[in-house]
Image (tube, rainbow, N blue to C red):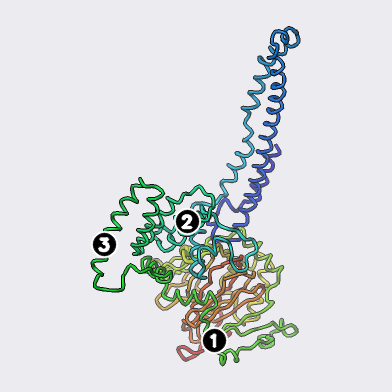
Amino acid sequence: MGRLSCLLILSSFFPTLLAHNDFFTSIGQMTDLLYIEKDLVTSLKDYIKAEESKLEQVKKWADKLDTLTATATQDPEGFLGHPVNAFKLMKRLNTEWGDLESMVLKDTTDGFISNLTIQRQYFPTEEDQTGAAKALLRLQDTYMLDANTISIGNLPGVVHKSPMTVEDCYELGKIAYTDADYYHTELWMAQALKQLDEGEESTIDKITVIDYLSYAIYQQGELERALELTKRLLTLDPTHQRANGNLKYFEFQLEKQRKQEEAKKASQTQRMNNTEKREAQRKRSRDPLPERKVYEMLCRGEGIKMTPRRQSRLFCRYYDNHHNPHYLLAPVKQEDEWDRPRIVRYHDIISDSEIAKVKELAKPRLRRATISNPVTGVLETAHYRISKRRATVHDPQTGKLTTAQYRVSKSAWLTAYEHPVIERINQRIEDITGLEMDTAEELQVANYGVGGQYEPHFDFGRKDEPDAFKELGTGNRIATWLFYMSDVSAGGATVFPDVGAAVWPKKGTAVFWYNLFPSGEGDYSTRHAACPVLVGNKWVSNKWIHERGQEFRRPCALEEAAS
């Protein structure tokens, strides 16, 4: 009964997990899995304790009979001449050995197996494991980390250091191999081999690792290295059928290559560096993001285009938005983050208690993030964003919001009538910006997952997306307000690749910018991205403010691109 009660309590403790998956897209929801695993460990310990108790009883029985039979067999007839000994022998063999058999055969796994079966419905899926693995590869690329740095857990800002095993490295390599990503296959199979060579014990053998590694290197055009590894594999297993075939093939190809190159001194078999290999892999995978290099540089804090002259024109000030009554006595702290486009940050603009309430309301509803379909204006899941709500984007073919695969997050929408805190936050944004909130979208709360990111995008609908936000009927997104609801140990910046700007998360602050000029034309310099979270847990919430209702609050200008 106690175990059943425990299971019922646990089932009620994780009600939201039944309906959701994509755990890797939200650190916030992933924390629930730790409690599930903790309960399973408790259940496993109970099972071990029961097994140990059973074995202890069997051991005592065996020890007792060992002494008894040792004495009895020294003088069997004399021993059985005692009627009590004869009776007890009959009793032991007829009854007690049967009882012992029943005890040994007694299944003590029921509680643990029942618990495991119930909790399994909350477990991550294969997609989660693959998603988390690909997130590690993305972090490796964005922040230029070598495999060994990641494997030993030596990441910036890390509190809970966690080294990777040979099996972990091998799994990453295999996932990359499945995607024909031979660049990352090589990096992680090489790391697995390195750890095996250093003496780490593993269920994965060197033959298997070298087999993958040599093929990945061959696929990247390095025949000599592939041949060297194949020869090493054959020293470990001379009968390896594939390696023997590859040996002959590689030798033939190298000889053919040498004949073609004998008139040249520079050999095309020269090793490529990792940067060249990565570029080659990007071409193979047809990376659709033209500004990826700039985007990743900004994420690392490199390539920021702010000159000292422009920097000198950025200021901090106390701001009351033209004597707004709410802020006459206690104006807000406003800081210029960037000049063109103008991005301002407000400090201490949301309290810890408000953040806690927003997260409490949002967490049970987190879904894979959505985006607006530029053709139909419908919100759909975004496959390019790694956060929760698993982001949605506008599908350019159908116009509907679909899961954004380049947005790794999960999000939830909160309405003003749900709680006074949300109503108060909306009013605060209106007071500070001077813009109408009745036509704005609901407050969107996003929690980023493993390597959580949102690749470069526009918040507003472009001219080739005439039906963007059509369902809302409130016009285009005129401005964006973004709350940072957590500090991030490493990574997670908001960057603007076209202008070389980077804004770093700081808990309790918010940033604001206009997406449209007063003329209604889109400001293309506001194309921005959320960098992958390297270490930490990133929570943000944003308010997309629309054109309708702003006619007198931000009047239109005559010039096409008036500032």
Residue identified by numbered label 2: 193
Which three-letter amino acid code belongs to the residue tagged 2? Answer: Leu
N-term-proximal mark, 1 vs 2: 2
Q: Give 230 or 184, whichever is nearer the viewer.
A: 230
Q: Residues within 10 Å of mark 2 (few under 14, many from 20)?
A: many
Q: Is residue 5 above or below residue 269?
A: above
**Residue 284 rendering spot, x and y as whole percentages:** 36, 66
**Residue 21 rendering spot, x and y as whole percentages:** 53, 54
Q: Give 372 or 141, whichever is nearer the viewer.
A: 141
Residue at the spot x=54%, y=86% of the render? 306
Residue identified by numbered label 1: 306
Q: Is residue 108 above or below residue 44?
A: above
- Quarter where residue 436 is shown: bottom right
- Quarter where residue 220 is shown: bottom left
Task: Report how far apart the C-alphas of labels 1 and 2 lie in the structure.
Answer: 44 Å
- Quarter where residue 100 is shown: top right
- Which part of the image, by quadrant, shows the N terminus? top right
Which three-letter amino acid code belongs to the residue tagged 1? Answer: Met
Which three-letter amino acid code belongs to the residue tagged 3? Answer: Glu
Q: Give 183 or 431, whichever is nearer the viewer.
A: 183
Task: Report how far apart the C-alphas of labels 1 and 3 lie in the structure.
Answer: 54 Å
Front label number (3 vs 2): 3
N-term-proximal mark, 1 vs 3: 3
Q: Residues within 10 Å of mark 1 (few under 14, many from 20)?
A: some
**Which type of secondary structure does the marked residue at label 2 adopt?**
helix
Residue at the spot x=33%, y=47% of the render? 241
**Residue 304 rendering spot, x and y as whole percentages:** 53, 82
Tag 3 near tag 2, CB within 8 Å: no
Q: Give 73 or 30, whichever is nearer the viewer.
A: 73
**Residue 179 rendering spot, x and y as whole percentages:** 40, 59
Residue identified by numbered label 3: 255
